[in-house]
Image (tube, rainbow, N blue to C red):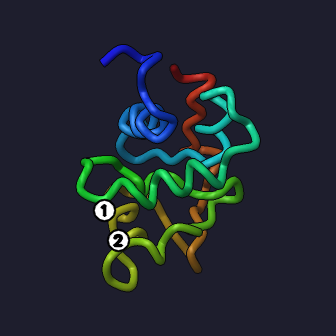
Amino acid sequence: MQPETLSFFEKVYEVAKKIPYGRVTSYGAIAKYLGAGKSARIVGYAMNGSRGKDIPAHRVVNRKGLLTGKHHFEGTNLMQQLLENEGIEVVENQIQNLETIYWDPAKEL
């Protein structure tokens, strides 16, 4: 499929698939990278709709590093467990050392 024919959600998924293991990005960073800077919430909707698509949605958090999408994962702490399995420290639903592990698609892609 040519990039210009992809839906916004599919474009979000293409970016999310590139987030490296052990790193996180934000809904807003993905939206900004895609030229839709005010669409962070839509990126969140895309992440919520990504179940079964092999998308690392657990690596997308809010701009402060909060696990705001955690209630969309099965189980009580699955999002946190997935992040911790990648070596990311989470305390009270917030990524620790966010500035160290933050991945900005605008700079990295």
- Height in image: 102 above or below 34? below
Query: Residue 10's x, y, as percent?
Result: 41, 36
- Residue extending farthest to the right is 38
Residue 37 drawn above or below residue 89: above
Could you give the CA–CA distance between mark 2 and mark 1, rounded to whole angstroms?
6 Å
Q: What residue lies at 26% left-to-right and 49% top-to-bottom? A: 53
- Residue 77, given in percent of the width and then of the height, sits at 39, 80
Q: Quadrant of residue 30?
A: top right
Residue in view at x 66 percent, y 49 percent: 40
Q: Which mark is residue 31?
A: none
Q: Which residue is mark 2?
A: 81
Where on the picture, by quarter, is residue 66?
bottom right
Kind of element beneath mark 2? helix
How busy is the neighbourhood of tag 1: few (under 14 within 10 Å), some, or many (20 plus)?
few
Q: Is residue 70 above or below residue 18?
A: below
Eyeballing the image, is 105 above or below 54? above
Q: Are marks 2 and 1 in contact (CB under 8 Å)?
A: yes
Q: Position of residue 39 (x, y in %)?
A: 68, 45
- Which part of the image, by quadrant, shows the N terminus? top left
Q: Which residue is mark 1?
A: 85
The residue shown at (57%, 63%) is 95
Q: Is residue 35 left or right of residue 56?
A: right
